[in-house]
Image: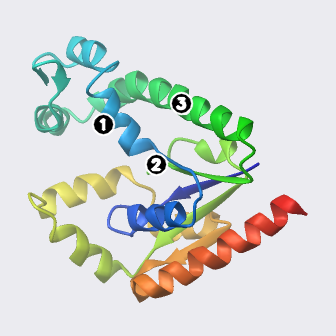
Amino acid sequence: MIILGLTGSIGMGKSTTAAMFIDRGIPVHDADRAVHMLYENEAVVPIEAAFPGTTLSGHVDRALLGKALQNDPRGFPRLEAIVHPLVRAKEAAFLRQHRDAGAKLVVLDIPLLFETGAEDRVDAVVVATCALEIQRQRVLSRPGMTEEKFALILARQMPDSDKRARADFLIDTGLGLEAARRQVDDLVERLLARAVG
C-alpha cells in the first residue's frame, strides 16, 4: 500500500485537492478533521487543563483557544503535545483499516507535514500550490480573516517555495479546478501502476 502525504500552505487548495482524491475513490485521512473531532471528545479535558477557559459545554471553543494562543504564541508547543499524539493514533487506525481492506493507495492530508517531520511516515509527498497572489486573495476572502491572522499563520508554516522543493509531486491549483483534477487523475494512475508493479 502506498501512503501519499498531501500538504500545502493555507489557501493553496489542499482541501480541494484532497476532495479530488476522494472523488477518485482513494481513502483520505484528514488531520484537520481528526482535530475537529478530538475537540469534541478526547482532547477537551487536557486542553482545558492546559488552557483554562477555552472549553464550553463539553467541547473546545476554537475562537477562545485561538485568542489564548494569539495572546501567548508560546502555547503552541503545549497544544501540539496534547493534540499530535491523539491525531497520530487516529491515523494509525486509518492505515490499519485500509491495509487490511487491501487498499493500494491512501492519502494522509497533513497541513504541517514538513513542519512536524511527518514525511518520515509516508512513501511520497504531494504539495498543493499556487501563485502567491492567488493564495493571498483566497485567504483574505475568508470570513474573519485579517492581515494579522494571515501573517501569524504564515509565520508557523514553511515557505511554499521550500515545500515545493521537498515535494515528490506538485498539484498546481492556480490553473482552475479542471486542470487540478487532471493532475490528480494523472498522479493516481501513476501511483496505482507503481503499487501494482
2 horizontally vs 113: left or right: right
Instruction: Give the x, y percent position of residue 104.
Output: 74, 53
Q: Judging from the image, what secondary structure is the residue with disc 2 in? A: loop
The dot on residue 88 is 3
Of callouts 1 and 2, which one flags the residue occurring earlier in the amino acid sequence?
A: 1
Q: Amino acid at mark 1?
A: His
Q: Is residue 92 visible?
A: yes
Give how far apart the Cα atoms at labels 1 and 2 are: 16 Å
Tell me the quadrant of the picture where the C terminus can be found. bottom right
Residue at figure coordinates x 76%, y 48% from the top left? 1
- Disc 1 and disc 2 in contact, CB within 8 angstroms: no
Q: Which residue has dot 1 on it? A: 36
User: Marks 1/3: CA distance?
Assistant: 14 Å
Q: Residue at x 13, y 60 (%)?
A: 145
Residue 37, by quadrant, is: top left
**Label 3 sits on what residue type?**
Arg
Residue 113 place in picture, x, y as percent: 52, 49
> Which residue is the site of mark 2?
112
Task: Please tell me the numbered disc located at residue 94.
Answer: none
- 169 displayed left or right of 135: right
